[in-house]
Image (cartoon, coloured by chain):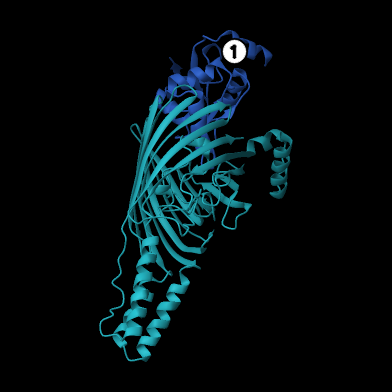
Chain colours: A cyan, B blue
């Protein structure tokens, strides 16, 4: 393994034209990695529990025990050219939209430090929406099996291509840091394509000893191309055309207005997150809250969680309470009064379809989880977690692939076992 | 080097001090300031670690940062994979750590009090 890593390091150095004495090389290049092997079982067999929204299927309906959702392996190379200039590259292999495990470049950026306190990065950078955005995939770095989906699946994008600027400073016993960023991201999801062509935001974090407080704002302008939803818009456009050409101008205009209102282009999304943690050593507590606003078919939502745990040597029992509460938009739709039978039926069907679609975009749920982290060996942690998920009224929560037999608004249990490692 | 390792292992109860380069302006540092450096919250220094098996390392992190070795590793796993901070460089012996601090203006390390010579400056006694 060491031999292989040395070879990778050598290849990197060669590619960069920076070949120096061995000692200098070791100082300059570091190669590390992390990974997780996981297994998940869900008692809801009419829909799938997935590791992220980028995955096409998971535990429950598709697989009784799913070993793909949480499993991943990643390598990271850091090259320090000078005290001021460095490069970070991270590649992750995990289960993705096309049902394959393919390596993806998660980060690839150059960092320039103007001073030890002020630095800028350019390239592919972690999107800092949440408290543990940087390490949301590093299982070993976190106590729980995975960050609560009630928050982290509301903003699933993990990186953006662009620039950022960070500044840190101290005042008496406080460490402050601020970051502002701008970029774009075009990930693929099983349901279609995401094009976040403008992403920007800022965050502020302050630490005093064991206490930490963070506030972050992220804004995105997103185009979605969802294969399942496009037919609904086609139907609306056809109905608008038909209504207008048969002289029902008002209803036709209403139908056209609905296309404009709910189209999946230029969707504004904003995420305001407030997080805090206190970790004196023997125990810890982490809490995070999110206010999400989104146009089009998306539902505004409020989400939050609290995780607390205690450390007994190599064992860390913990518990999490999490909730996401989304508004369900209701659309009056096209007024059917005065429309002849066929058009009235068509309009009513379109209205119903639209409201059903709006409901699919909510995803309210709450959950309670209890688990144990066991630092079994050097650089290896084993975790077991039980979660009880209670879906909101008429909601499928964060489940994917609901089957005809799926009943929204129910509850289910999820059992997870992971082995996290770093190297 | 063998002598230094022997020295370190026979002096398990030896007093541990934090050293910096003589060029560093601070005459002393608080435990909190030192903990910030070794937990990645202050990028103004180049910290040096002793091996995980060394008695000094356990004593240093427990007393200065209030964290055991597993917690420190989880914290660094979080920081290292951001690419934002460099983790402490690990040295095989106290002598090597002293040499590193003596030759690096931003160097900082925790070593046995007896290993401190004119090439470095002690800024905190760990107790």
Q: Residue furthest front?
A: A405
The image quarter in which residue A211 lies: top left
Residue A59 placement, left or right of A79: left
**Residue A359 percent location from the top left of the image:** 36, 62
Quadrant placement of the C terminus of chain B? top left
Tell me: residue A89, above or below residue B60. below
Residue A28 placement, left or right of A381: right
- Residue at horizontal 45%, vertical 50%? A165
Tell me: residue A37, above or below residue A403. above
Viewer-proximal residue, A11 or B16? A11
**Residue B13 percent location from the top left of the image:** 51, 9
The answer for which chain carries disc 1 is: B
- Residue at horizontal 39%, vertical 52%? A202
**Residue A124 percent location from the top left of the image:** 54, 54
The image quarter in which residue A132 lies: top left
Viewer-proximal residue, A347 or A120? A347
Q: Is residue A337 in view? A: yes
Q: Is residue A289 in view? A: no
Q: Residues within 10 Å of mark 1 (few under 14, many from 20)?
A: many
Quadrant placement of the N terminus of chain B? top right
Tell me: residue A185, above or below residue A286. below
Disc tally is 1
**Residue A381 percent location from the top left of the image:** 54, 31
Q: Which residue is mark 1?
A: B8
- Residue at horizontal 34%, vertical 31%? A173
Q: Secondary structure at mark 1?
A: helix
Tell me: residue B27, above or below residue A347. above
């Amino acid at each position: 393994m060491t031999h292989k890593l040395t070879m990778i390091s050598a290849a990197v150095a060669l590619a960069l034209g920076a070949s120096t004495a061995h000692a200098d090389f070791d100082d300059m290049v570091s190669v590390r990695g992390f990974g997780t092997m996981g297994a998940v079982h869900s008692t809801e067999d009419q829909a799938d529990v997935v590791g992220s929204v980028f995955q096409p299927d998971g535990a429950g309906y598709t697989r009784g025990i799913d070993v793909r959702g949480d499993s991943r392996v990643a390598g990271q190379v850091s090259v320090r050219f000078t005290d001021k200039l460095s490069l970070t590259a991270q590649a992750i292999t995990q289960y993705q939209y096309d049902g394959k495990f393919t390596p993806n470049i998660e980060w690839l950026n150059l960092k320039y430090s103007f001073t030890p306190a002020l630095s800028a990065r350019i390239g592919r950078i972690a999107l800092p929406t949440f408290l543990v955005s940087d390490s949301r995939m590093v299982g070993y770095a976190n106590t729980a099996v995975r960050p609560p989906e009630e928050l982290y699946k509301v903003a699933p994008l993990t990186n953006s291509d662009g620039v950022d600027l960070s500044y840190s400073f101290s005042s008496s016993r406080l460490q402050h840091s601020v970051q502002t960023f701008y970029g774009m991201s075009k990930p693929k999801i099983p349901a279609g394509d995401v094009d976040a062509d403008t992403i920007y935001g800022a965050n502020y974090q302050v630490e005093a000893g064991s206490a930490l407080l963070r506030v972050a704002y992220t804004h995105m302008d997103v185009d979605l191309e969802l294969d399942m939803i496009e037919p609904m818009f086609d139907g609306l456009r056809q109905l608008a055309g038909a209504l207008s050409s048969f002289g029902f101008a008002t209803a036709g205009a209403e139908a056209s207005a609905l296309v404009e209102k709910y189209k999946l282009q230029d969707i504004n999304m904003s995420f305001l997150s407030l997080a805090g943690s206190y970790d004196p050593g023997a125990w810890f507590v982490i809490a995070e809250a999110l206010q999400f606003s989104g146009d089009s078919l998306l539902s505004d939502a409020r989400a939050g969680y609290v995780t607390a745990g205690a450390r007994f040597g190599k064992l860390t029992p913990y518990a999490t309470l999490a909730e996401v509460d989304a508004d369900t938009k209701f659309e009056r739709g096209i007024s059917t009064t005065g429309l002849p039978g066929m058009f009235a039926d068509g309009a009513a069907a379109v209205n119903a379809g639209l409201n059903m679609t709006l409901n699919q975009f909510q995803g309210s749920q709450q959950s309670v989880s209890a688990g144990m982290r066991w630092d079994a060996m050097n650089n290896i942690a084993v975790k077991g977690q039980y979660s009880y998920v209670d879906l909101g009224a008429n909601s499928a929560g964060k489940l994917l692939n609901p089957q005809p037999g799926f009943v929204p608004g129910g509850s289910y249990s999820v059992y997870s076992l992971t082995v996290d490692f770093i190297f | 080097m063998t002598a230094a390792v022997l020295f370190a292992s026979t002096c398990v109860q030896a007093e541990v001090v934090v050293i910096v380069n003589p060029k560093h302006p601070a005459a002393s540092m608080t435990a909190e300031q030192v903990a910030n450096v070794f937990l990645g919250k202050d990028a103004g220094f180049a910290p040096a670690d002793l091996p995980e098996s060394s008695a000094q390392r356990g004593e240093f992190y427990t007393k200065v940062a209030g964290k055991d070795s597993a917690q420190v590793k989880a914290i660094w796993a979080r920081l290292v994979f951001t690419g934002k901070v460099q983790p402490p460089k690990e040295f095989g012996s106290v002598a090597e750590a002293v040499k590193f601090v003596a030759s690096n203006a931003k160097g900082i390390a925790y070593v046995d009090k007896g290993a401190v010579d004119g090439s470095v400056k002690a800024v905190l006694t760990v107790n």
